[in-house]
Amino acid sequence: MKSMSYPESRARYAEVLDAVTNDREEIVITRAGHEPVVIVSLADDESLKETA
């Protein structure tokens, strides 16, 4: 699982989306003063919800 800062994710937005959709990568986005978030593909999210 990759991790990057919010500014880096904005600068590399298309690359982030490509990694998530094409490579099934999960990417953690960190932001000062906020909880981290994870970007996952819709298919992976639906799969996770089915098994929960």
Image (cartoon, helix red, strand yellow):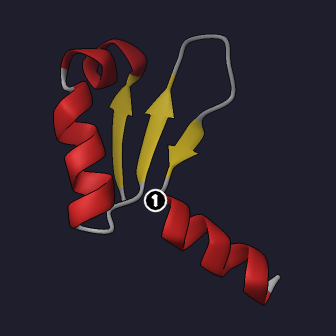
Give above or below for 46 relative to 10: below
Residue 34: percent from left, percent from top:
68, 18
Residue 43: percent from left, percent from top:
51, 70
Judging by the rendered image, the residue that carries numbered circle 1 is 41
Horizontal placement of 22 versus 38: left or right? left
Question: How would you rate the neighbour count of disc 1 (Cα within 10 Å): few for under 14, some for 14-19, many for 20 or more?
Answer: some
Give above or below for 23 relative to 17: below
Q: Residue furthest bottom?
A: 51
What kind of element bears circle 1?
loop
Give above or below for 27 relative to 14: below
Horizontal placement of 47 versus 20: left or right? right
Q: 27 or 23, which lies in front?
A: 23
Residue positioned 53% across, 60% down in the render: 42
Q: 29 or 44, which lies in front?
A: 44
Residue positioned 65% across, 71% down in the render: 46
Q: In the rendered view of the protein, which quadrant contains the C terminus?
A: bottom right
Residue positioned 48% across, 56% down in the render: 40
Residue positioned 59% across, 38% down in the render: 37
Residue 31: percent from left, percent from top:
53, 18
Q: Residue furthest right?
A: 52
Q: What type is the residue that disc 1 sits on?
A: Ser
Residue 36: percent from left, percent from top:
60, 34
Q: In the rendered view of the protein, which quadrant contains the N terminus?
A: bottom left
Give above or below for 44 relative to 18: below
Q: Quadrant of residue 48?
A: bottom right
Count of residue discs = 1
